[in-house]
Image: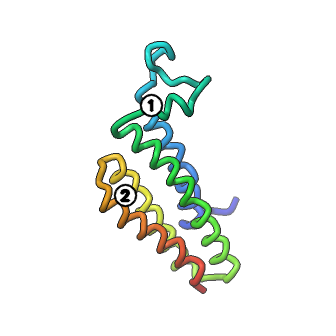
Amino acid sequence: MTSLTISQLCLLVACVLPIVCAGLAKSKGFGKRRRDGGFDNHQPRAWLANLSGWQARAHAAQANSWEALPVFVAGLFVAHQHQAPQATVDALALGFIAARIAFVGLYLADQATLRSVVWLAGLVTSAALFFVG
């Protein structure tokens, strides 16, 4: 069995992060029946549209996490194709994950300006993967 590189582990984390955000968004309805405000799996989009506060922001962070994922995946693919130095790819991947985790935390805390700065940092690390090697 081959061990994963740091960047491959980061890819796994990046894929799981939107699911974690979804769980946070839906946590308001855990343990409740649908008629008592619990999560409505029959009409999930309508239920999510009625969220407010940090749960609504967690849902938005989930959507943004899915949106950021393809650029990161493509960047890793290109870096691999260019046979970029693994240490550089790993460092950029760790930077992306750090930015995305900070982004989610800042989104939940309603820190819009700082969240946007951190979002840009994540985008820059993903874009940089296209140019290493």
Which quarter of the rendered picture does the N terminus lie within?
A: bottom right
Closer to the eye: label 2 or 1:
1
Frontmost residue, 48 versus 122: 48
Q: Is residue 96 above or below residue 45?
A: below
Asked whether 89 or 17 is in front, the reply is 17
Q: Position of residue 41 (x, y in %)?
A: 59, 25
Q: Is residue 9 visible?
A: no
Closer to us: 132 or 60: 60
- Taking the spot 51% from the left edge, 68% from the top edge, the residue there is 93
Q: Position of residue 119 (x, y in %)?
A: 42, 63
Mark seen at residue 102: 2
Residue 131 location (% of width, % of height): 58, 83
Look at label 2 and name its amino acid. Answer: Ala
Residue plotted at (45% across, 67% down): 122
Q: Secondary structure at mark 2?
A: helix
Q: Quadrant of residue 75?
A: bottom right
Number of numbered discs present? Answer: 2
Alpha carbons under labels 2 and 1: distance apart: 25 Å
- Amino acid type shown at disc 1: Asn
Q: Are marks 2 and 1 in contact (CB under 8 Å)?
A: no
Q: What residue do we see at 55% from left, 49% from top?
A: 16
Whether residue 114 appears in this view of the structure is: yes
Dot 2 or dot 1, earlier in sequence: 1
**Near-viewer residue (47 or 27):** 47
Q: Residues within 10 Å of mark 2 (few under 14, many from 20)?
A: some
Quarter of the image containing the C terminus?
bottom right
- Left of 52 or right of it: where is 1? right
Which color scheme does this rendered protein use?
rainbow
Q: Which numbered disc covers residue 50?
A: 1
Q: Position of residue 34 (x, y in %)?
A: 51, 17
